Amino acid sequence: MTAWEPPDRPRSRLAYCCPEKMAEDREPPPLADAAQTDFREVEEGEDLFVSTVSTAEQLSPTSPEPASLPAEDISTNSNGPKQEILLDDDQEDLFAEATEEVSLDSPEREPILSDGPSPAITPVTPTVIITPRVDALFDRSLDEDEEAEENGDTFDMQITVSDPEKVGDGMNAYMAYKVTTKTSLNLFSRNEFSVKRRFSDFLGLHSKLASKYMHIGYIVPPAPEKSIVGMTKVKVGKEDLSSAEFVEKRRSALERYLMRTVNHPALVKDPDVIQFLENTELPRAVSTQALSGAGILRMVNKAADAVNKMTIKMNESDAWFEEKQQQFENLDIQLRKLHASVESLVCHRKELSVNTASFAKSAAMLGNSEDHTALSRALSQLAEVEEKIDQLHHEQAYADFYLFSELLGDYVRLITAVKGVFDQRMKTWSKWQDAQVMLQRKREAEAKLQYANKPDKLQQAKDEIKEWEAKVQQGERDFEQISKNIRREVERFEKQRVKDFKVVIIKYLESLVHTQQQLIKYWEAFLPEAKAIA
């Protein structure tokens, strides 16, 4: 199976070939609107999408719904009306093609995560508010972004999450994290900046990105999962090893989440991402609580989606999608099994560390009570070696968890996000099919009106048919576009997955080799003491 390749760069809007000879043979075809046709060559670096954004804003200035699929398959340069004329000596090559206006706002499309009623919370007033506009995100095609990223021209960001700090007391307390960004991208006003963010801010960012991008086939990295038990321990002020491990685990997960988000060529330019990383103050996310109205609504929506997934039977005509869906189902099962095994290994190493420390303590006590000088010294040396080995087991358990186990956990959640965009494609297909069924009903109704000779209602029926024909065409374009986006996203995901696993496996093996080398070094140093026992 050949890998999908991005389309070639668009040709200029007008190409002339031998105009003098053409004038002698025939007259050129009339243009649709000579006053509006732009015959100038597109200059390098010119923004080809400005007219598209303006047209979209004029068509739907107040629509709050997420943007519908961009019609990249229809026109690479613009979503608005254009004409492309190619003149050649061959009479059959003469054509004028016009494309339809594709609205970037679809009133039928519902956001995936809706904001429902939530407890009354006074939000923090932001100093700068950036109004999200999805339209501007498509000024540059994702193909060009990925090509530039492969050449190392776009991505230059490093984000660290550090300094977890408890703010407040009791059950109203929360953890605040310092998010530091270093970048040379022109998207940001400075090269290095830091902000304070709480966990709900990260969840709010993911909610916004998912509602804007999942329905058009983009894989949005999932945010870390909530842990009510772990956070409750932190809130009540229970200072123990498990609380410290929970905070460190969450800090590391948030850092990886942000890096995966800004690694996406489209998400890194999103106004909400820029606002999250740059603005000192941020409006508080009030719909992320598990027991809030929005949280309950999300659970209901998930249950409804599960039922719809079982009831909708899609006749898959593309073998690639069928193969990939089965591949991700199998990958999900195997990753979950491996993740459970590695977590068991982490627990085993922690228990081994505890037992080794207990053994070292017992050996030291036995050496102190031993009358034989050489034997007492050897037991004391053995206790010291076991203490060092205890530290090695603890460090290796740390590497098992933060290097290997967390990577597997992240990809289990990422596979769920990938399966989610496949579900969105199925929803888009179902919406297209529903529009076709409704169009057929409208045509049947029109036929009945003609047969019954009711001209007063015939015009209304024709208008409805025209409306549903437009919806069918839009549904077909949406389905083709989301299919194209998913192919591209899966290809990018596979490349990143192989790269991530390679880097982590190498680091993990290096940690294992280092641990074994240290063990050999400690035992070789102890061997002369054991042989010296007389």
Image: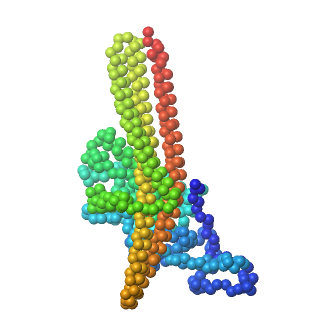
Q: Is residue 370 visible?
A: yes
Its colouring scheme is rainbow
- Estimate the x, y position of residue 393 in percent, counting from the top left: 42, 32
Look at the picture and state if 338 lies above or below 300.
above
Q: Quadrant of residue 401?
A: top left
Task: Locate residue 184, reporting x and y percent.
Answer: 53, 58
Q: Quadrant of residue 22?
A: bottom right
| Residue at x 46% of width, y 16% of height | 529
In the rendered view, would you say 155 is above or below 363? below
Residue at x-position 53% and y-position 48%: 499
Q: Quadrant of the C terminus?
A: top left
Left or right of 82 on screen, residue 300? left
Residue name at image x 41 percent, y 64 percent: 427
The image shows residue 512 at horizontal and vertical percentages of 48, 34
Residue 301 relative to residue 37: left or right = left
The answer, for residue 201, to whether it is visible in the render is no
At horizontal 49% and vertical 30% (from top left) the residue drawn is 516
Looking at the image, which is closer to me, 100 or 441? Answer: 441
